[in-house]
Image (spheres, rainbow, N blue to C red):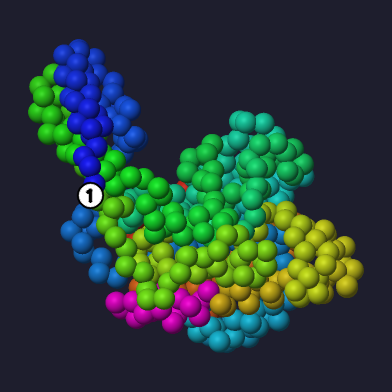
Amino acid sequence: MQTENPNVHSSVADASHILDRSVACSRINRRTLLRGLGVSLALPSLNLMQTPLARAAEQGAAASPVRLAWVFFPNGTNAERWLPKGKGLDWQLSPSLEPLADCKSDFNVLRGLAQVNAQSLGDGPGDHARSAAAFLTGAHPYKTAGSKIKAGRSVDQIAADSYGRSTRLASIELGTEEGRDAGSCDSGYACAYSNNISWRSDSLPTAKEVNPLRAFQRLFGTGGQDSRLRQMQSHILDFVADQRSHLERIAGSEDKQKLEEYFNSVREVEQRINRFTKEITLPEGTKEPSEKPNDPTEHIRLMYDMMVLAFQTDTTRLATFMLANEGSNRAFPMIEVKDGHHQLSHHENKQENVDKIAKIDKYYSEQFCYFLKKMKETKDANGSLLDQSLIVYGGCISDGNRHDHHDLPIILAGKGGNRVETGRLLEFPINTPLNNLFSTMLEHVGIEGVTFGDGTGRVSLG
């Protein structure tokens, strides 16, 4: 039998004392009320809270939500074998994309997209660092090997601000390779740039999880947090919200809006705690994965499995996955490529190396096919998970030998809630910002009018 935790009463009493003391003061620190309670609140902006999407989410309007994902591969491609030719429905899979034949009708290949801010722009070498940093941000990273890193907010985190509020986790960030953020990894660029594609702010990358077991526990477990502590947090949030009138009586006119935002934030945190403590029903037969496997293929597929489960259970609707860090020198002995990937990408047109790069490109396509098939086989309210998703697969370098950042290798899979026609090769004007695609994806989940990075508008997906 569980015994009552005395810390609950003492913590609530402490909160009451803090509140009474704060109300008595003429100046109130907006973080004082919840300090020391294990809850961190960021003041949200009202324009985000009033979006049609947020209101619809509160009303439970999205019976079958659209999921968004971005899958990144490093070091560019053998462009001649990766980029297909044709137009519209009249096109053929390129040699590197042949493993995707069974899923050809479920994705579009997009040509002409670019991330200009991954170019040097006067900063000299460092294309790999700029590739990862610019991929989802469209921002030119500040060249430093120190702590003053700066890139831009990534599309997944922009979506997490509002779309992520409806789920247990706002987003999930996955990878297969560890990577430090400190020190230089590419020609004077901090390692943080090469090892992350998700950026919570322009100076803070979002750490990715590379261990399948820890990813599973983060998605579907309690993270080791005691249930009574979660109950205490919920009660405290209710307690603080009930004191709204006391604070409003002493607030000046300029503080009214801030208080409104603050207490809306309190309520949002309470709702997120409730979502987090709600038990998730996993599909029958689901087992916890093992620790990080030694086999790269098993590792990649386990992470894809995590994404499918996360989307299937609506634990999150936003995911990023780095198949490897940018500049990765991983070898692929399982496909008879024993040289490092990064080393081979500088192939200098030597046929043996070009052929090995093509093998790696094809290998990654095979793993992506595994993911798409699982998404397609998993049923959702309005079809399959793949029908209810928009998934970007690609990188921010086209030809690895030339380090070019235009005509990028980009696939967009899924129908976005049956609103996107698939099975086509879409060609856009040269140097169309990749961020225009991302803004279009945001519109598909109700986030309208957002242009960021070097974005200039939207793209037509038909």
**Is the residue 425 above or below the residue 211 in the image?**
below
Q: Is 47 above or below relative to 315? A: above
Is the residue marked by circle 1 packed among few (<14), some (14-19), or many (20+) residues within 10 Å? few
Residue drawn at x 75%, y 74% as measured from the top left:
334
Horizontal and vertical percent for residue 394?
60, 65
Q: Residue at x 71, y 62 (%)?
A: 76
How many numbered circles does the render carry?
A: 1
Image x and y of residue 386, in percent: 43, 75
Residue closest to the far front: 1
Question: Label 1's element?
Answer: loop
Judge whether residue 79 can be spotted in this image.
no
Q: Position of residue 445 (x, y in %)?
A: 35, 62
Decide which of 294, 228 is in the foreground and name it.
228
Give the residue type at disc 1: Met
Q: Is residue 283 left or right of residue 49?
A: right
Locate residue 239 relative to residue 275 in the image: left or right: left
What percent of the width, then of the height, locates residue 354? 83, 71
Drawn side of residue 53 relative to residue 390, left or right: left
Instruction: Classify residue 345 as left or right of residue 326.
Output: right
The magenta stretch spans residue 350:
no
User: Image point 68% across, 81% down: which residue?
Assistant: 94
Q: Which residues lie in the magenta part?
A: 371-386
Between 128 and 17, the residue placed more toward the observer is 17
Instruction: Give me the residue at 31% from left, 27% from top.
Output: 35
| Residue that carries the numbered disc 1 in the rendered image | 1
